[in-house]
Image: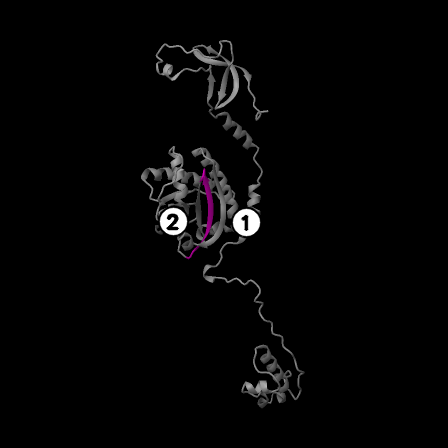
């Protein structure tokens, strides 16, 4: 057997422990204060009479100055930082696509940006949703389960007002949507779901499906309250109105695609080479695009009284002479000059010059 500590060595260790912990110190009194004399066990005889030299012990205290963060095992993280970052990049693409479409649709400057992407429980998310609100439940096959898109009334009602031809006024009090408003909001949400499909196309091919639009958040239970979700918080600006839009994606829905949510794979897919056939297809589609062409014969000014008294057969004298070129517009831009005429039985305009502005040069 190996050597054992002698009584004096044990007393030294006990005294040192007493000094470090604020206990008794000095001589053999340390061992006596514990009410036990290890010399009674005759440990020296068990070691064949050999005594080990006195040894010292080092006690390392915790560094309380360090920033120690608690970890809640009931809410264990299920997404890595890399996966959260990839989801953020996906929805930044979604925000760009949706903002450009809404700007053209409602004819007002629209800005949408991703404010944050975080991992929270579904209960924490649903408790922050106002009641009533505009809550869309949708699926993203082949991914399992449903997700939630929440549009705050502060931005939902101005958006519908603009679509109906108004100035984008906000309702004084939040309320449930009428049947007509539900149909309008459904068209907006379908556009948003199509852009979600486009944004996720580098990861997986989705087939978005709108399930239902709810107003009460407590009727929306797509996953257990303690289940972890990815919450994408977006800020929407329509003119001078600002509101929020949230997208909640449960873990059970994203579980099958988590291995694909890496920055390396995202960029490898995103930077794929453009097919040589793509420019040809785009050119063919552009050639089939219909545009409005308008020939302006001239203009004149009359009083409101003369205008109201106009009758069939009256003649208005224009400021343009018969041998002057007239303006030809494509859309609302002046592009050509021409001479009016006739081809067969059809009225026509012969192009005499091309008008180039600074953007075309």
Quarter of the N terminus within the rendering: bottom right
* Percent position of residue 221, x then y: 37, 52
**Above or below, comparing residue 221 to residue 301 in the picture:** below
Crowding at mark 1 (Cα within 10 Å: few <14, some 14-19, many 20+): some
**Above or below, comparing residue 284 to residue 32 in the picture:** above
- Main SS, magenta residues: strand
Crowding at mark 2 (Cα within 10 Å: few <14, some 14-19, many 20+): some
- For marks 2 and 1, give the CA distance: 34 Å
Can residue 279 be seen from the camera position used here?
Answer: yes
Relative horizontal placement of residue 222, taking residue 64 as reference (left or right)? left
Quarter of the C terminus within the rendering: top right
The part of the chain drawn in magenta is 226-240
* Percent position of residue 262, x then y: 55, 49
Q: Does the magenta stretch include residue 201?
A: no
Please tell me which of labels 2 and 1 falls first in the chain: 2
**Above or below, comparing residue 54 to residue 213 in the picture:** below
Q: Which of 201 and 246 is in front in this view?
A: 246
Residue for point 33% across, 37% down: 180
Which SS class for mark 1?
A: loop
Q: Residue 262 carries which label?
A: 1
Instruction: Select label 2 or label 1 by which is in front.
Output: 2
Residue for point 62% across, 83% down: 12
Colouring chosen for the image of the structure? one colour
Residue for point 37% across, 37% down: 184
Which SS class for mark 2?
A: loop
Residue position marked by numbered label 2 in the rendering? 130
**Above or below, comparing residue 352 to residue 119 in the picture:** above
């Amino acid at each position: 057997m190996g050597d054992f500590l002698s009584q004096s060595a044990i007393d030294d260790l006990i005294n040192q422990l007493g000094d470090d912990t604020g206990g008794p110190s000095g001589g053999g009194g340390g061992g006596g204060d514990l009410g036990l004399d290890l010399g009674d066990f005759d440990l020296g005889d068990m070691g064949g009479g050999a005594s080990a030299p006195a040894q010292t012990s080092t006690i390392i205290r915790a560094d309380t100055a360090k920033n120690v963060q608690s970890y809640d095992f009931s809410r264990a993280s299920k997404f890595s930082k890399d996966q959260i970052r990839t989801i953020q990049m996906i929805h930044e693409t979604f925000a760009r696509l949706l903002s450009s479409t809404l700007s053209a649709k409602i004819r007002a400057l629209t800005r949408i940006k991703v404010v944050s992407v975080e991992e929270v429980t579904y209960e924490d998310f649903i408790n922050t949703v106002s009641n009533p609100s505009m809550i869309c439940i949708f699926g993203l096959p082949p991914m399992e389960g449903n997700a939630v898109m929440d549009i705050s009334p502060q931005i939902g009602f101005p958006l519908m007002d603009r679509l109906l031809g108004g100035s984008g006024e906000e309702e004084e009090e939040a309320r449930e949507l009428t049947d007509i408003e539900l149909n309008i909001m459904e068209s907006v949400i379908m556009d948003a779901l199509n852009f979600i499909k486009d944004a996720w196309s580098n990861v997986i091919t989705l087939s978005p499906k709108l399930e239902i639009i709810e107003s009460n958040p407590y009727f929306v239970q797509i996953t257990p309250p303690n289940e972890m979700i990815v919450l994408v918080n977006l800020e929407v600006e329509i003119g001078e109105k600002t509101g929020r839009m949230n997208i909640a994606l449960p873990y059970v829905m994203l579980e099958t695609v988590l291995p694909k949510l890496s920055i390396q794979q995202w960029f490898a897919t995103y930077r794929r080479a453009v097919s040589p056939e793509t420019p040809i297809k785009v050119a063919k589609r552009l050639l089939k695009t219909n545009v409005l062409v308008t020939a302006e014969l001239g203009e004149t000014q009359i009083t409101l009284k003369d205008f109201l008294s106009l009758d069939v057969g009256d003649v208005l004298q224009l400021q343009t002479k018969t041998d002057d070129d007239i303006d030809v517009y494509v859309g609302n831009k002046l592009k050509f000059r021409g001479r009016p005429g006739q081809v067969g039985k059809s009225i026509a305009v012969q192009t005499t010059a091309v008008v180039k502005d600074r953007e075309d040069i």
